[in-house]
């Protein structure tokens, strides 16, 4: 299996303009997420918010902020990338199943 980080670095170098335009388009469509992410970044820099040394769920030292509600930008859960991705997978699954249940109620 190839080293993902090395692959992504090479891909970014080869497709820099494409990556930047995709990122710009994403942030234009998700301004509330960008504002929340920037608020956390600034708060950590100026000391208002303290980044913990480990994930909330395990002892992994690589942590990132997860927003439950983007209207509360400094209310974050600090998770490792594995648990962060897992949380989003579970939320997507729950949302999909909720839509399926609502559709079934309409049909029946």
Image (cartoon, grey):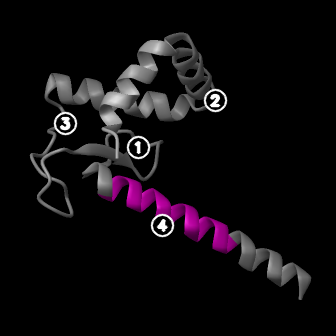
Q: How many marks?
A: 4
Among numbered discs 4 and 3, the one appearing first in the sequence: 3
Q: Position of residue 47 (x, y in %)?
A: 13, 28
Report which residue position mark 1 lands on. 72
For discs 3 and 2, the disc positioned in front in the rendered view = 2
Report which residue position mark 2 lands on. 29
Report which residue position mark 4 lands on. 90
Which image quadrant is residue 101 in? bottom right
SS state under label 4: helix
> How far is disc 3 from disc 2 in space, using C-alphas?
27 Å
**Which residue is painted at 21% across and 45% down in the image?**
63
Nearer to the camera, 76 or 54 = 54
Range drawn in magenta: 83-98
Quadrant where the image shows the C terminus: bottom right
Q: Main secondary structure of the magenta part?
A: helix
Task: For the residues labelled 1 and 2, say whether their Cβ atoms are less than 8 Å apart.
Answer: no
Nearer to the camera, 44 or 97 = 97
């Amino acid at each position: 299996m190839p080293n993902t980080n090395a692959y992504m670095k090479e891909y970014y170098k080869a497709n820099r303009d494409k990556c930047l335009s995709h990122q710009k388009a994403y942030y234009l469509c998700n301004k509330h997420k960008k504002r929340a992410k920037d608020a956390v970044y600034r708060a950590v820099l100026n000391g208002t918010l303290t980044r913990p040394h480990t994930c909330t769920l395990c002892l992994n030292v690589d942590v990132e902020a997860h927003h439950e509600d983007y209207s509360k930008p400094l209310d974050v859960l600090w998770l490792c990338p594995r648990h962060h991705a897992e949380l989003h997978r579970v939320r997507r699954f729950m949302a999909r199943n909720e839509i399926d249940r609502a559709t079934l109620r309409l049909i029946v």
